[in-house]
């Protein structure tokens, strides 16, 4: 089986449960179409700020897919940060590094399903290579899909993107939210932007 | 004395009369009573110890889910339908609860009695409720705690002829910040963290935070003899390498309705009749958003100052469900939670976000009758299997329709269903669509705030796990003091009932010790 660039994506995340429950399905997608996926090449070039990220759980390709998805899910209000500026994909990656377990395997599996989902619709392209209008069409088809795992993959990733964008205080003025009454204090295991460039932990040996 | 994992520098061994697993409404109440009676009590809490004095409660959902919520707010049922809302901090789920404080209705206490529960009748509970209400400063929500959505709720209910009443609140000096779910930054909400935990400590109890119980231990005769635990490094959420072993005359399992059954199973304790983890209920919460002509700002002030009890009990005719079986309240979501529960993406989602200040909503707590189960996976982690089905699906759809009716009567111009399709309702004639929308398979996500039943109480070990003294049928010396023991959900917010039952459990443990 020629996996092409798919080797950088998740291949065997079979979860017993999870918010997505799609690990097995993602594997099936890849296994079923493996011979042809290499034909569609790598994800397109990315913004330098994304290229500079150092993901902890996701592969670089998975981070790129997640960032591309976040760009379509979130339409910033004027004055608000872009999803890239809010480092949504990297914040999710950090959270996966903290929680671990099934979520840390389900999310990469969901990203695989999104990235190669157009191929299942007989569109010879990765999600990240589609024009934005075609990406939106694809996400709408996920929203209404009769295939449970595709719907769940979309729903779970959408939820994460929105939470990690709208928990960025720069997004608040445009939605009429004044924010907390007290000063911020990061938790020890933080997923905030301020924590992303520092290693997680300090675990005792 | 509170010990946190950062202070632990070696493996530890403790010997006590009572080790209590969990510091929420059940564990804290019981620990306070037993410590006051002179027993040596050690409370073990999986989560961290957070305080307003340290500035830990910063009102930000990303930070606070990480601090006080089990699974950092990302845990779901196995099918993804339910978001599990469990506590993981000193004080347990009471730190994020809404402070709604209901006594167990007499009809539900009578039902428990009919099921063979002894010593938990309404008359037995009354003095405990009196004391809890006094200690936690519980009082009906005064007018100043009604936010705009609460007032709209009452206006809508009045239009429909439904009765409303102020919801009794465990609050003292509330500043109406609206961040109850993120944990009170002002110690105004009377959670266990600021009530029973300090009183337990004053009475001599000790508490180890960041301490995860790996197993309940038994002696050669099968009697509970202590626990084995690991300290957790908060900066990684993983064990820090230091272990704890506790030898105890009695063990009290009070880790909460989502976790206690999993600890039992992980410990390999007897389960001859396969009752452990069965009968898991969780009060699933369907909710709707609504757009109003004027600002609502639902995130301000307290969540549920008001509500209607008109539909608490299900009504059937000739055995066929008609309506009801839930509580109905105004909803409160902070903007980041509103964002992720509003449907759509891109510009469609943006248009809804632009209306956020005018967005209100309603929520119901379903008095569920069809249980799920708690199991453990190969790593010993809890797996919660639950599907809203049968009569509970009928209740859920009825609750959604009543919510829509109320929101429209309150003046909403549009009701928005938080499903993937983004179903909209603009007048009463469209409400019937709620009979047809997909509630399953990721179509909608529901909150699951009130777990119960997975270690249920009853007289017969073939159909229950603990007896009316809260002691395990099959493990002498192991008591359970949390909502896992409820034979059925209490039909109201369970916090007061958990505490009242824990007073009874404390008496049973005390009798065992003396």
Image (tube, helix red, strand yellow):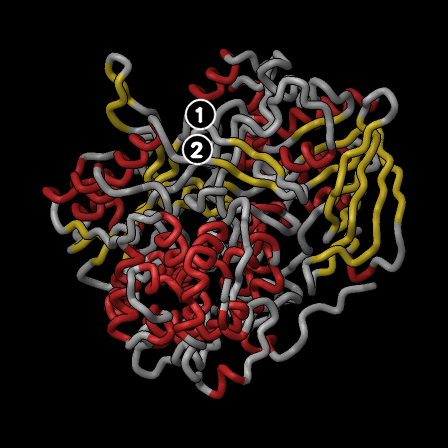
Viewer-nearest of discs 2 and 1: 2
Look at the picture and state if B79 lies above or below A20: above
Earlier residue among tags 2 and 1: 1
Look at the picture and state if A191 lies above or below B140: below
Given residues B491 and A118, the one toward you in this image is: A118
Do the residues under discs 2 and 1 have CB atoms within 8 angstroms? yes
Residue indicated by mark 1: B105
Q: Position of residue A138 (x, y in %)?
A: 29, 64
Residue indicated by mark 2: B492
- The residue at the point 35 percent across, 76 percent down is A129
Given residues B322 and A98, the one toward you in this image is: A98
Within the image, what quadrant is residue B343 found in? bottom left
- The residue at the point 75 percent across, 55 percent down is B239
Q: Position of residue B491 (x, y in %)?
A: 43, 29
Within the image, what quadrant is residue B474 found in? top right
Q: Position of residue A82 (x, y in %)?
A: 39, 80
Can residue A142 be seen from the camera position used here?
Answer: yes
Q: Secondary structure at mark 2?
A: loop
Look at the picture and state if B69 lies above or below B493: below
Q: Secondary structure at mark 1?
A: loop
Q: Is residue A68 left or right of residue B52?
A: left
């Amino acid at each position: 089986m020629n996996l092409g660039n798919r080797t950088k994506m998740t291949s065997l995340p079979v979860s017993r449960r999870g918010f997505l429950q799609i690990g097995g399905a993602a594997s099936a997608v890849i296994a079923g179409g493996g011979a042809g996926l290499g034909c569609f090449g790598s994800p397109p070039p990315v913004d330098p700020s994304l290229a500079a990220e150092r993901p902890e759980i996701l592969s670089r390709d998975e981070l790129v897919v997640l960032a591309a998805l976040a760009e379509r899910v979130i339409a910033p209000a004027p004055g608000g940060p872009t999803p890239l500026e809010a480092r949504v994909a990297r914040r999710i990656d950090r959270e996966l590094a903290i929680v671990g377990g099934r979520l840390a395997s389900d999310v990469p599996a969901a990203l695989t399903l999104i990235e190669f989902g157009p191929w299942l619709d007989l569109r010879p392209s990765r999600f990240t290579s589609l024009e934005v209008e075609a990406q939106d069409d694809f996400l709408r088809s996920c929203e209404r899909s009769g295939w449970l795992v595709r719907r769940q993959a979309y729903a779970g990733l959408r939820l994460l993107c929105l939470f990690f964008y709208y928990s960025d205080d720069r997004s608040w003025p445009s939605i009429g939210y004044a924010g907390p009454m007290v000063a911020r204090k990061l938790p020890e295991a933080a997923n905030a932007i301020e924590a992303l460039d520092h290693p997680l932990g300090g675990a005792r040996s | 004395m509170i010990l946190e994992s950062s202070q632990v520098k070696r493996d530890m061994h403790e010997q006590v009369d009572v080790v209590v697993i969990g510091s929420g409404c059940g564990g804290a109440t019981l620990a306070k009573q037993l410590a006051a009676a002179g027993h040596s009590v050690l409370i073990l809490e999986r989560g961290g110890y957070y305080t307003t004095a340290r500035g830990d409660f910063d009102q930000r959902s990303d930070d606070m889910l990480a601090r006080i919520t089990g699974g950092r707010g990302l845990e779901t049922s196995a099918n993804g339908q339910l978001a599990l809302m469990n506590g993981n901090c000193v004080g347990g789920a009471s730190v994020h609860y809404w402070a709604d404080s209901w006594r167990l209705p007499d009809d539900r206490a009578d039902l428990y009695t009919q099921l063979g529960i002894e010593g938990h009748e309404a008359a037995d509970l009354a003095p405990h409720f009196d004391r809890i209400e006094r200690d936690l400063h519980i009082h009906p929500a005064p007018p100043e705690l009604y936010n705009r959505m609460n007032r709209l709720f009452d206006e809508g209910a009045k239009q429909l002829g439904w009765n409303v009443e102020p919801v009794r609140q465990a609050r003292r000096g509330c500043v109406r910040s609206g961040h109850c779910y993120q944990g009170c930054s002002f110690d105004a909400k009377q959670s266990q963290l600021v009530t029973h935990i300090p009183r337990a400590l004053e009475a001599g109890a000790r508490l180890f935070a960041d301490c995860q119980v790996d197993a309940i231990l038994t002696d050669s005769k099968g009697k509970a003899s202590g626990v084995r635990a690991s300290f957790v490094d908060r900066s990684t959420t993983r064990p820090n390498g230091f272990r704890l072993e506790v030898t105890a005359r009695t063990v009290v399992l009070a880790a909460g309705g989502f976790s206690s059954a999993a600890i039992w199973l992980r410990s390999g304790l007897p389960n001859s009749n396969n009752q452990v983890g069965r009968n898991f209920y969780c009060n699933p919460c369907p909710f709707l958003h609504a757009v109003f002509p004027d600002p609502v700002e639902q995130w301000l002030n307290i969540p549920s100052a008001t509500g209607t009890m008109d539909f608490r009990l299900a009504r059937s005719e000739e055995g066929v469900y008609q309506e009801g079986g839930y509580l109905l309240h105004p909803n409160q979501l902070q903007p980041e939670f509103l964002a992720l529960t509003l449907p759509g993406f891109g510009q469609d989602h943006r248009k809804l976000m632009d209306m956020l200040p005018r967005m209100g909503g309603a929520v119901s707590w379903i008095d569920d009758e069809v249980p799920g189960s708690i199991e453990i996976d190969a790593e010993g982690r809890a797996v919660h299997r639950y599907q809203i089905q049968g009569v509970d699906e009928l209740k859920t759809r009825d609750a959604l329709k009543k919510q829509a009716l109320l929101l429209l009567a309150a003046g909403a111009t549009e009701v928005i269903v938080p499903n993937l399709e983004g179903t909209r309702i603009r007048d009463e004639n469209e409400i019937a669509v709620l009979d047809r929308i997909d509630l399953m398979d990721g179509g909608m996500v529901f909150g699951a705030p009130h777990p119960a039943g997975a270690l249920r109480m009853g007289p017969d070990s073939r159909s229950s796990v603990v007896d009316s003294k809260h002691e395990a049928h099959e493990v002498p010396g192991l008591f359970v003091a949390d909502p896992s023991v409820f034979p059925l959900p209490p039909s109201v917010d369970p916090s007061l009932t958990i505490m009242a039952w824990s007073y009874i459990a404390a008496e049973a443990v005390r009798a065992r010790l003396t």
